[in-house]
Image (cartoon, grey):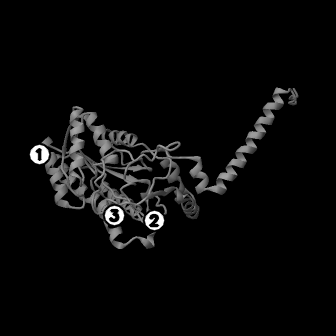
Amino acid sequence: MQLAEQVVVITGASSGIGRCAALHLAARGARVVVTARRADALEQLVREIESDGGQAVAVSGDVTREADLRKVAETAVERFGRIDTWINNAAVYLQGRVREITPDEYRRVLEVNLLGYIIGTQCALDVMHRQGTGAIIQISSILGKRGAAYFSAYAAAKAGIDGFTQSLRSELWGTGIRVSTLYLAPVDTPIYQHARGKFGTIPKPPPPVSDPESVAKAIAKLIERPRNEQIADTFSFFYLAMSKLPSRGGDWFLHRTAQFTLSDIPDRGDNLDQPLNDVPRVRGGWAEPGWRGFTLRETVRVLPVESLLAAAALGFVTSRVARRIGAVGNGSMPRRRP
């Protein structure tokens, strides 16, 4: 079905990717049903969509509560008659060493980032089996394919989504219901400002950082042309290529580059258990410094030895090229024999 003909449910729509996707899909004609814990943020989002001529309805709730997501599904059917695509997107973020993260913190991340997807999928399936058609999109991360230092809880949940979704796809064979997984690289959203940091500061996304608008476009494309798995950013291919290397090599690289994820912004609260009362927004501002958040100064700080070697190699190549150009200009280059 074309996007303009679809009814789309989006979880975690109060900010970041969910909010951006809702605005983008509604602008293209989709009727959207948005849910998150913050009713005020959802109401503001609906007003923005409607002011641009779109159609939207908000249902506040927690994805870890089955009754809340049942209400979302029921509202979508009551308001628009069906659910064509259900997007599981709600997530919380936690940074810390494994030995410093409590079992309750692990439990909460898994409840939101994995169990929330499972409950949402079940609610979507109940409607889609009656319809005989539909699509479910799981918003995942490259960390689900290859975990990185300090993000064990998030990576565990995203890896769990893979196992769950692969099992589900084989179960749904021949039903007319498609399930897709979209793997994202770091995206410029407020999820990092909302995260719990165990180092006294909030985490930050390692560069290069993607723009949420590009993710929204990838979601729209996946809605109209479903695929089992989709990678949304070129950087993801390089990151996932580490799985082809010896595991110790990948471990060394991710250990060396983990400093890119540490900010100097004090941790002043998080949304792990309760939503924060900040201004709802799509972007977190992480892509603004340098090129997609990538700066020479931070690279030298995190990788001083590697930066020195790279500078030396660049200087050597530059000097060789300069001498060659100078030789050509002076006419002193030896002529080739015929």
Q: Quadrant of residue 249?
A: bottom right
Q: Secondary structure at mark 3?
A: helix
Q: Residue at coordinates 78% horizontally, 31% vertically from top-left? A: 325
Note whether 130 is above or below 322 in the view shown.
below
| Foreground disc of the pair 3, 2 | 2
On screen, residue 248 versus residue 23, left or right, reads right
Circles 1 and 2, Cβ within 8 Å, touching? The answer is no
Left or right: residue 109 versus residue 203 is left
Q: How many marks?
A: 3
Q: Could you tell me the amino acid type at mark 1? A: Glu
For the residue pair 233 and 311, the one nearer the viewer reads as 311
Q: Amino acid at mark 3?
A: Val
Tell me the distance, in whole angstroms, between the alpha carbons under discs 3 and 2: 18 Å
Q: Quadrant of residue 31?
A: top left
The residue that disc 3 covers is 109
Please name the amino acid that badge 2 sits on.
Phe
Name the disc covering residue 78, or none: 1
